[in-house]
Amino acid sequence: MTQQLISEITGTLWKIERHVGDCVEEGDVVMILESMKMEIPVEATMAGTIKELLVAEGESVEEGDLLCVIE
Amino acid sequence: MSLEKKMAELKEREERAYSMGGEEKLQRRREASILNARERIDYFVDPGSFMESGLLGVSSVVEADRERTPGDGKLVGFARVDGRPAGIASNDFTVKGASSSLTNMKKISHVKRVATERGFPLVFFGESSGARMPDNMGSRGMGALLGNDPTQYVRHRESPWATAILGQCYGSSAWYACLSDFTVMRKGSVLAVASASLASVAIGQKVDPEDLGGWKLHDEVTGLIDRVAETDEEALDLIRKFLSYLPSHKNEPPPRALVPEGSDEAAAQVQDILPESRRRVYDVRKIIRSMVDQDSFFELKPRFGRTVVTGLARLDGGTVGIVANNPMYKAGAMDVAGCEKITRFLVLCDSFNIPIVMMVDTPGFVIGIEGERMKAPGKIMNFMTALQMCTVPKLSVIMRKSYGQAYLNMGGGRNSDEVVAWPTAEVSFMDPAYSVQVVTWGRNPSEEEQQQLRKQMERDNSVWGLAEMYSVQSVIRPADTRRHLIKTLEFHTMHLSGGIGKHQLSAWPTTF
């Protein structure tokens, strides 16, 4: 089973907190976006391993963009 | 015929009505753990209080259906719910899919008229297939059955309406769900204009019923429902809970409840939930829960338009409507769905004399192409007009950010009856990070000058300016918010009218 984390807002990826291969629990902060001058955490919606990170720090993201795949 | 024979016939007709659509269909429902129309009523109302109306009604259009349509597929009547009167309409899907025909439409119309004119809530248990065939077919079918009651699908909100969607809801049960003040959907149910099979026949669209009108769609995308339930019983419990916050009709204030112990103590913790950094987000629901009477927060549409939170709660035992920005989602910047959600909630509060408390922490409205395509400016003005037309008391608490037009929409200035702010409040037209760029447009300021401008702007955004010119009435400590709101509401109760507002929004639409 995989879970895709999608950006809920247009902004930039400010900080990556967890990397490919890391184990995460549901609710763990995987990365932090910056938009409207606020830090917006992106949380894992299920426990698993991070399989893929699709954006790098400093890159801009659009609402609906795929950010990360958890397996 | 002797009286004895007449009595025997009455008994026989009653028994036929109670047999509903037959044992086989009822058994299938039992096996699926789905309540039937009578069990739903029994579960919902105070024990023994249901007084049925139209038990002996059957089809009056197709002669051959007279024996096959006990109750004509829709059961109605009056009952007590937590001691207060209510009208009930329960669809019996085991009888011709609870489809609409002449007799059962008269039954619904009657219970609706009595609930409206005598002043008590109306509750629908939705599960119906739509108009009955062949009854409604052809121009004579349409002319005889449809369109003869101009009040059938109109909402003036004289008394609260609530719907539980408990199966397939097409036609009337879908329409009544959308006209209701509160709609809960049991998982596995469908709410749509027409069924997936009709969509397949008529337009060749193959679609899964869940995608067409399942709970996920309505919970997260359309916002046509307020809550989701796992079982029939949970759905009915949620309606009972919703009604506990509301008056029986528009001409009385909401009922009062006892104040749970520990409510004042929890409210003192509010401050700990707000992060130190103005850049950090938090879930505003934690602040709401600790500020209102313990366990009294009843959220509406929790997964739709999540940039804002709306819900009923109690302060010192009295019902209030909470509207809050939620920085947890999109930094609390209000989007189109958030505006729609607030507008609908303001209509509910204004219609039923519920004071409104706005908890403000928003950088503004969401900007960018997505919102513009969804008519964002129109939605913002809809919300603004609704707020200004509300005649119930409106209190606004600026917790942190309040920027631009959103300052007005969230009750800033004279858009609410009292505005208070926490010392952490910051108010301006635009976040300093952006306004530095706007005021230096067209020239190339040094890094040092930008820093200086920004610092000055941050100082100017602090709450003290508003307090000095009386654009907020008070600056309060976060821990005092509960106490302050309770005291303020004592004075802002609508003393002149016995707590009754003017209901300027009561005839507004139900979907925005």
Image (cartoon, coloured by chain):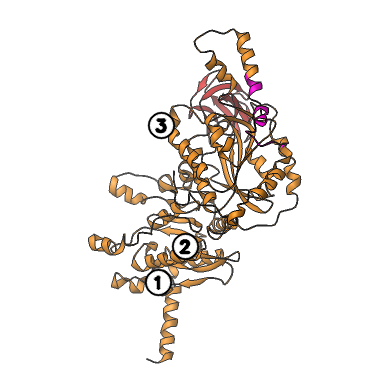
Chain colours: A red, B orange
Q: Which mark is residue B336?
A: none
**x and y percentages locating residue B3 in the rendered image:** 42, 90
Residue A57 appears in the figure: no
Residue at the image point whose x is 47% and y is 36% from the top: B380
- Front one among B165 and B386: B386
Residue appearing at x 50%, y 34% in the figure: B335
B443 sits left or right of B292 in the view? left
Residue numbers of the magenta segment? B457-477
Q: Amino acid at mark 1?
A: Pro
* Mark 3 secondary-structure assignment: helix
Quadrant containing the N terminus of chain B is bottom left
Residue occupied by mark 1: B70
Q: Is residue B494 visible?
A: yes
Q: Secondary structure at mark 2?
A: helix
Question: x, y (%) of residue B93?
Answer: 42, 62
Name the subunit of mark 2.
B
